Image: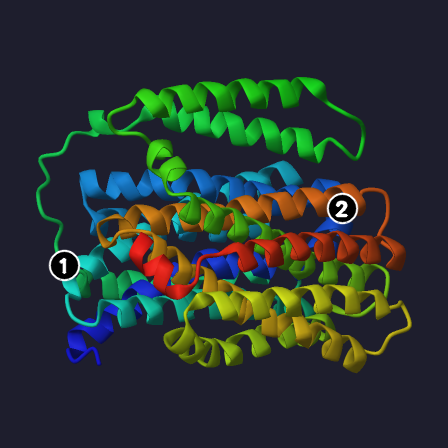
Amino acid sequence: MIRSNKHYLLLITIALGTLLNPLNSSMISVALTRIQGNFHLSFSDVSWLISTFYLASAIAQPVLGKLGDFFGRKRLFLLGLSLVAAASMLAPFSPNLGTLITLRVVQAIGSAALFPSGMGIIRNVVTENQARAIGILSVFSSTAAAFGPSIGGFLIHWADWPAIFLVNFPFIIASFTLAIFVLPKDSVHEQKAANLDISGILLFSGTIISFLLFLLSLDSGFNGWDLALGIVFAFLFYINESRSRNPFIDLRALTSNSNAALVYLQFILVNVIFYSIFFGVPAYLQKAAHFNAQTTGLIMLSIAGFGVVIVPLAGRWIDRSGPKPVLITGSIITIIGTLMLQLIQDSSTAAAIFGLLSVLGLSVGFNNLGLQTALYTFVPRSETGAASGLFMTSRYFGTILSSSLLGMIFASHISASRFHLIATVCAVIGTIVLMLSVRMPNRKLAEKTG
């Protein structure tokens, strides 16, 4: 147990802040249709609200994690909450999509500062049962992401899409107030900001932005310039990181640890599937099947509820047998679940859709916990912090790819046939995930490797 009441209060303070990123990333899924109609946009247009949020998070989280080391984690935590508050206050008054996207980016940057700062504080303060403390934080984050569409559905039903921004304030106020009194004061660091790999950050950003622009333009044609620019940025990023003494992402360590690298790849693919369904289902249900936001939110509870319930069961299984059997099971359930989505039609009842989606809910708990455990099996304890940051960045990559996939397939209109195409693509990706799970070393070999 985590015996100190002060430690519990510390965890609650950090958890209330860190849940803002996953909560805001998933609540938007049921708001897209309403925003699309409000500003008279296509689905490709509003999909930028998803992709830019994760793009900003993917870049900001590792950067702000390092800045927290330089300038103080408590200071960065409070700054992050302030940015989220400012963006959430102004977003409901956005006159156009461009302004709303900009405020979503600010919201993403602010919320991205909270996880690395919070994790750094926990690792310094909670010296006993640290894994349990990190597990509690993970439950808050995963629960917030899982229940985001359901919360968003109720809010939009009663107060329209601006409510998904205003609902942040109870969490922000509680976390900010507690942080002032509970979080430890920042110690003085002698590290210099000059150690920050600015060129690596810029090249990394250029790479991701270029490839994202290429993917999002596929619905209207092949943009070779964006693809070529992305390849150039990627090459320069590789050269820069290989030569840097303090690389933004240590590619040398990553390439020398193939098991960890494949876990990152597998997590990217798992999140492509998860978020394609997580964002695609609400869009289809509201636009093609004509369910309201409240009913859509209730249907999405199937994924959230079953995902949360399965986590403790998966944890006990992992303790006994390691992550590999859990991941193989999760992969098989993913394939079955995505294939079952072919049964959903415009005339399907809410209860039937709920039952079909619940199968995918089971896979979420297996895959997420299994991959996180596998990663720490392959990574030395001294590299836990860096590995955790890259693991989260992998999730953002997967989500960016999922929004691009949805933008391409739902570009002109949303229909059952196009939804089934998304499900088919996800089943194919699930097969690749299964292959990666099967090739994963068993528990004993993995422990020797780690």
In the depicted view, which residue is nearer to us: 441 or 265?
Answer: 441
- Near mark 1 (Cα within 10 A), the count class, few <14, some 14-19 or many ≥20, is some
- Left or right of residue 129, residue 233 in this image: right
Give the image location of residue 420, x and y in percent: 83, 58
Give the image location of residue 34, x and y in percent: 73, 56
Tell me which amino acid carries mark 1.
Answer: Pro
Q: Quadrant of the N terminus?
A: bottom left
- When asked about the image quadrant of residue 185, the answer is bottom left
Badge 2 marks a residue whose secondary structure is helix
Q: Which residue is mark 2?
A: 43
- Left or right of residue 418, residue 224 in this image: left
Question: Is residue 311 positioned above or below 372 on the image?
Answer: below
Tell me which amino acid carries mark 2.
Answer: Phe
Badge 2 or badge 1: first in the primary sequence: 2
Give the image location of residue 32, x and y in percent: 69, 54
Give the image location of residue 138, x and y in percent: 39, 66
Q: Is residue 165 visible?
A: no
Q: Which residue is mark 1?
A: 184
- When asked about the image quadrant of residue 302, the answer is bottom right
Residue drawn at x 78%, y 82% is 351
- When asked about the image quadrant of residue 353, the answer is bottom right
In the depicted view, which residue is nearer to us: 443 or 47?
Answer: 443
In the depicted view, which residue is nearer to us: 22 or 326?
Answer: 326
Contact between marks 2 and 1 (CB within 8 A): the answer is no
Badge 1 marks a residue whose secondary structure is loop
Q: Is residue 402 visible?
A: yes
Residue drawn at x 54%, y 59% is 437
In 3D space, how far apart are the residues under numbered discs 2 and 1 (Cα atoms)? Answer: 45 Å
- Left or right of residue 342, residue 337 in this image: left
